[in-house]
Image (tube, helix red, strand yellow):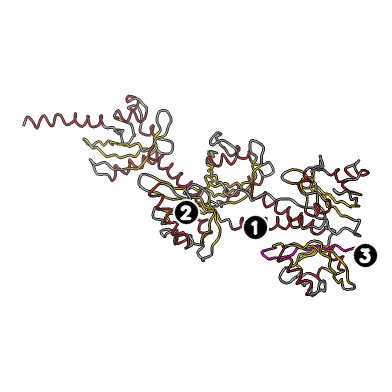
Amino acid sequence: MADRKDGVATAPAFHRFLFEANPQPMWVFDPLTLAILDANASAAAHSGYPRDALLRMRMTDLLAPGEEEAVREAVARTLRDAPAGRMTDVGTHRHRRQNGRPADVEMSWGVVRSEGNATILALGHDVTERNFAEQALWASEAQMRAILENALDAIVLIDARGFVLSWNPRAEAVFGWPRAEAVGRRMSELIVPPRYREAHDRGISRYLQTGEGPILNRPVELSALRRDGSEFPVALRVTALRDSDRVVFCAFVEDISERKRHEEAVIASERRYRALFEGNPLPILLYEPDTLRILAVNAAAVRHYGYSEWEFRDRSLPDLWTIEDADGRAEGERGTRHLSKGGRVFDVEVTAQAIEYAGRPARIAVVQDVTERKQAQDRVARAERLLSAAQRITHIGSWQWEVGADQVTWSDELYRIYGLAPQETPMTYPGFLARVHPDDVEAVQARVSEAIADGRAFDFDERIVRPDGSVRTLRSRGEPLVDAGGRVTGLIGTCLDVTERRQEEERQRQAEERFEKAFRSSPAATAILTLAEGRFVDVNDAFLRLTGRKRDDVIGHTSVELGVFDAETRARLVQVLEREGMVRGRPLTFNDGEKDRAILFSAQLIELAGQRCVLAQSDEVLR
């Protein structure tokens, strides 16, 4: 009996010990007035208020604005529904500490009744850091999803067995496989041509055994397979991502079909220009405008002047002038009389024009010897090399903008694209606009405003100005971030530097314009014909003047049909072209519809739009 009395006597002390020693905040408060009747040390530490101060406060004094009504409803519900002596979960409420910082607290409380009175015992669990971590994880995952969804490259993740784990929208567009059908299948079966699949599997096995792979972490170009079975060229970069227990391979794939077609067009264009330069029957001189030093000459100049190509490199234009023409460069360019290596003096007409050669200003001169001819037949004003294609692998930068807080987050790559050291400058929306080209600021603001107002994705080009003054062109893509109520809270997206691509397109357009101008304006009768049939593809005005025909009467017809050459003459010319690749200064007779005319005929084999053609030039012989 004495033991039982001792146990009863010590129970309140034991309960008090549990209350005081509990590491979680605990309060006892009046359910009607919400006045705090008791609080343990953890509650004081959590709120930042001394315990004696807490005993002069109400529970509502600890709440953040807007929380009081929810707490009063929870108290009423607890008094009405909760069984006595049991703790009930009443949800998460936001508290405000003494220093003003908020805290998310999961609350549980129960009703304690004694002698007709009721009090509430409340237990709190601080989940602020857990909620913050969950929000940060969600933001990180959202950013990664945005990068994958908006990437301009196809991005494919595969596991160590070669099975597809992730397949972004660009991969769907490039390869033709929907994400639902691609994920879970072997990548080699989807996009690797059959002849490469064994090597692909060996490469994965080699990495798993040695940690090395033949194509890892370096750009390569190879063929890929579409769903319809067609092959196309791609630029590929593969990175291995390893954590504690597995390996994932991330493949970035760019469809370079268009770039390859463009490169082939550039090569074909360069061949045409080179054919015009080397195959021209008239001498062509390329020289510096200031010093008049000769930079390059064609074969006709070597033959006409008697100097070898290397001897020309040691000379300037005045070395070719006679004494009476050596006083002025203008006279030398227009020309009256020139001098060969052997001392032969001949009358000339010179046409010159400014170009860019090897990245520097130059001039090109076409020389016509009018001593033996009645008029000049050729003026080809171009012999330049086009720059090679823009950089093969593009770099993608990502960004996120929280509109309300005007907080902008850039990836390290985006800082580099803008010419800045990664994370060197905190970014804001006005700071971003300050780096946009002044002529593009208004358009960029309008597109951003539309995205925020309408909640739609966007895709546009913009120019930026780097700190060193250089201007770059970016392709920007992104989409709005919306809350549960459908309100746009921010934007997230990617940027791709397309400067070199745009510049290359412009250079190609200018080169085509220059070629067209040289072809059309050349004084030499110039034509392009198919090799197989001798059918006219194009002719210049000088050709029409020489033959006395109209363009519509020539294009699409063969030289034999028009009576320009007979079948036997054309067959002999084709044999020479097939054997030697060119014909130079061959005397021929052709009929212009009224009479036979003597000409010097030159021709060069070229390739045009994948077809073997002949670039032919004719020069009428004086009788």
Judging by the rendered image, the residue that carries numbered circle 3 is 623
Type of amino acid at the residue the image marks with label 3: Arg
> Is the residue marked by circle 3 packed among few (<14), some (14-19), or many (20+) residues within 10 Å?
few
Residue 204 placed where, x, y %? Answer: 42, 53
Q: Which mark is residue 264?
A: 1
Q: Place residue 14 in its image quadrant.
A: top left
Q: Which residues are magenta?
A: 608-623
Judging by the rendered image, the residue that carries numbered circle 2 is 156
The mark lying in front, picked from 1 and 2, is 1
- Taking the spot 29% from the left edge, 39% from the top edge, the residue there is 109
Instruction: Say which quadrant the N terminus sits in.
Output: top left
Q: Overall secondary structure of the magenta stretch?
A: strand
Q: Which mark is residue 371?
A: none
Give the farthest residue toward the front: 342
The residue nearer to you, when weighing 415 against 584, is 584
Q: Earlier in the sequence, mark 3 or mark 1?
A: 1
Q: Secondary structure at mark 3?
A: loop
Type of amino acid at the residue the image marks with label 1: Glu
22 left or right of 448 in image: left
The mark lying in front, picked from 3 and 2, is 3
Q: Place residue 559 in its image quadrant.
A: bottom right
The residue nearer to you, when weighing 408 against 568, is 568
The residue nearer to you, when weighing 184 against 67, is 184
